Amino acid sequence: MRAGARLLNVRADDELAYAVALGYRFGGFDGKTEIGVELNGGIGLHEQDSEELPLEALGYLSHAINPD
């Protein structure tokens, strides 16, 4: 465990991080191209203000040039 810290209006302390992703592969399992979105975030265990509830969404496009 480490001591908490404060930077401007954000308190850095214990946090539960989470991530989830959803993708669609064109052509099923044998397809070479996939699009999707990933969500990453965290929940402060001591404070739940808007500053302590980050959420990031990242879209992606993936293509297997050589799927071997």
Image (cartoon, rainbow, N blue to C red):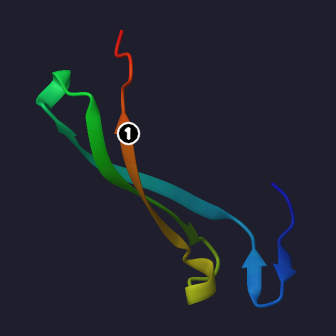
What residue sits 27% from the left and 46% below the top? Answer: 23
Camera sees residue 14: yes
Q: Horizontal placement of 49 versus 3: left or right? A: left
Residue 31 position in % (x across, y down): 20, 27
Is 66 placed above or below 10 here?
above
Q: Report the amino acid beneath label 1.
A: Ser
Residue nearest the viewer, comparing 53 with 23: 23
Q: Horizontal placement of 4 versus 10: left or right? A: right
Residue 5 position in % (x across, y down): 86, 74
What residue sits 40% from the left and 51% below the top? Answer: 60
Say which residue label 1 marks: 62
The N terminus is located in which quarter?
bottom right
Q: Horizontal placement of 46 versus 63: left or right? A: right
Residue 35 position in % (x across, y down): 29, 47
What residue sits 35% from the left and 50% below the top? Answer: 21
- Label 1 crowding class (10 Å Cα cut-off): few <14, some 14-19, many 20+? few
Is 16 placed above or below 55 here?
above
